[in-house]
Image (tube, rainbow, N blue to C red):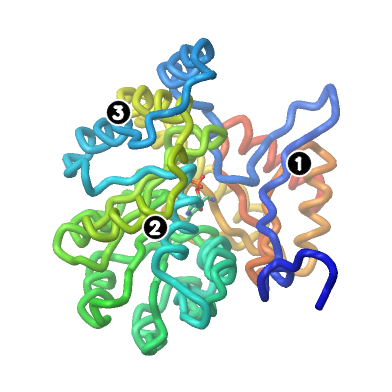
Amino acid sequence: MSNKPQARAGIMELSPYIGGEGRVGAGITPVRLASNENPLGCSPLAREAYAATASDLHRYPDGAAAGIRQAIADKYKLPVDNIVCGAGSDELIALIMRAFVGVGDEVIYSQYGFLMYPIAAKVVGAKPVAVVEKDFTTDIDGVIAAVTPKTKVIILANPNNPTGSLMKRAAIKKLIDAVDRSVLIVLDAAYAEFVEDADYADGTEFVVAHDNVVMLRTFSKIHGLAALRLGWGYFPLEVAGAINRVRGPFNVSVPAQMAGVAALKDDAFVAQTIAMTKTGLAQLHQGLNTLGFKTLPSAGNFILVHFGAEAEKIRLALRDRGVFIRQMGAYGLPEYLRITVGTQDDNARLLAALKEIVN
Ligand code: PMP
């Protein structure tokens, strides 16, 4: 027996999730392209709503988050009882694992799927099962083949971070039809708003029709509210009931709830963000390809780029110039770096710094 508290088996072997860097010394204006944040900030309506909460910080939030859930329900024309909010979709991912997955169970994800999936699975003592990707894209047949009697959850990002790849409606349908109804299928649509493909499905239509499909969304990206931690899920009623039983009673803060409601009213800000991302992506593809770097097609607000053996050196040289992009070693992609789409100026600064470094 050890004479000190011991974390549960496996916890200390976890590699903690490390967010993107972005802090610089005084006098340098950083270009922060490491965390898929919104370079335009957030809606002014959201900022006002956030500021207005300052006088009431001694009050607990509404534990049911009724206002923000109703605003989401109205915006997306969904039944409010099927919506549960979380402190970011990160929390919802963890809550899904806590409610549906136990020690020894299996959680299937795609090889380059969002890093929090295997971490959240391991936290509850489960085994994350990575399905090898084909051309940096989720292999749906591989996912189906990986299902065993121990599989409790399949979790896939669509579009996927960090690859930017997309699963089309038909692929999702194939997966849902092939998998036993006891397996919970989680479609993480954190970047849904950026997608232009007509064959894309965020998952909404499948949640309606199946008791074992859920969709996750976030206010961190398109709405630029990453600091506040606000995500939501559209769940079958029984799944929502389970999540509501395991979540903290006040898991979403008042500022997050209020700013979220206001953000949903600002369609102009959303449209501006989408337009900026589209032109920015084109600017980055073109600029990076001209410099000789291979880019992957992306349906999100970021781009995965092959830099080869010099990737980390290049990342550090960019950092020295105040430009932050994301290393991909934790995803098993050390030769790649992920770049969030910035404003036109941000992208130009990145490309200019890169040109200076490689020349
Ligand atoms: N899912 C995916 C695919 C993501 O890329 C992210 C953010 N990096 C999240 C979920 C978590 O977002 P948040 O917790 O900020 O809502």
At numbered mark 2, what does the secondary structure look like: helix, strand or loop?
strand
Which three-letter amino acid code belongs to the residue tagged 2? Asp
The outermost residue toward the left is 209
How far is mark 2 from mark 3, CA to CA?
Answer: 23 Å
What quarter of the picture does the N terminus occupy?
A: bottom right
Q: Is mark 2 within 8 Å of ligand 1?
A: yes
Badge 2 or badge 3: first in the primary sequence: 3
| Marks 2, 1: nearer the viewer | 2
Residue under label 1, please give it. Answer: 353
CB-based contact (under 8 Å), mark 2 and mark 1: no
Name the image quarter holding residue 181.
Answer: bottom left
Badge 2 or badge 1: first in the primary sequence: 2
Q: Residue at image x 41%, y 49%?
A: 191
Which three-letter amino acid code belongs to the residue tagged 1? Ala
Q: Residue 266, percent across and down?
A: 34, 23
| Marks 2, 3: nearer the viewer | 3
Residue under label 3, please give it. Answer: 67
Depth check: 248 or 306 in front? 248
At numbered mark 1, what does the secondary structure look like: helix, strand or loop?
helix
296 versus 149 height, above or below: above
119 versus 247 height, above or below: below
Q: Callout 3: few (<14), some (14-19), or many (20+) C-alpha neighbours within 10 Å? A: some
270 versus 27 height, above or below: below
Badge 1 or badge 3: first in the primary sequence: 3
**Residue 240: mark in rendering:** none
Q: Is residue 339 left or right of residue 235?
A: right
Name the image quarter holding residue 312.
Answer: bottom right
226 versus 174 height, above or below: above
Q: Residue 267, percent across and down?
A: 31, 26
Residue under label 2, please give it. Answer: 188
Which three-letter amino acid code belongs to the residue tagged 3? Gly
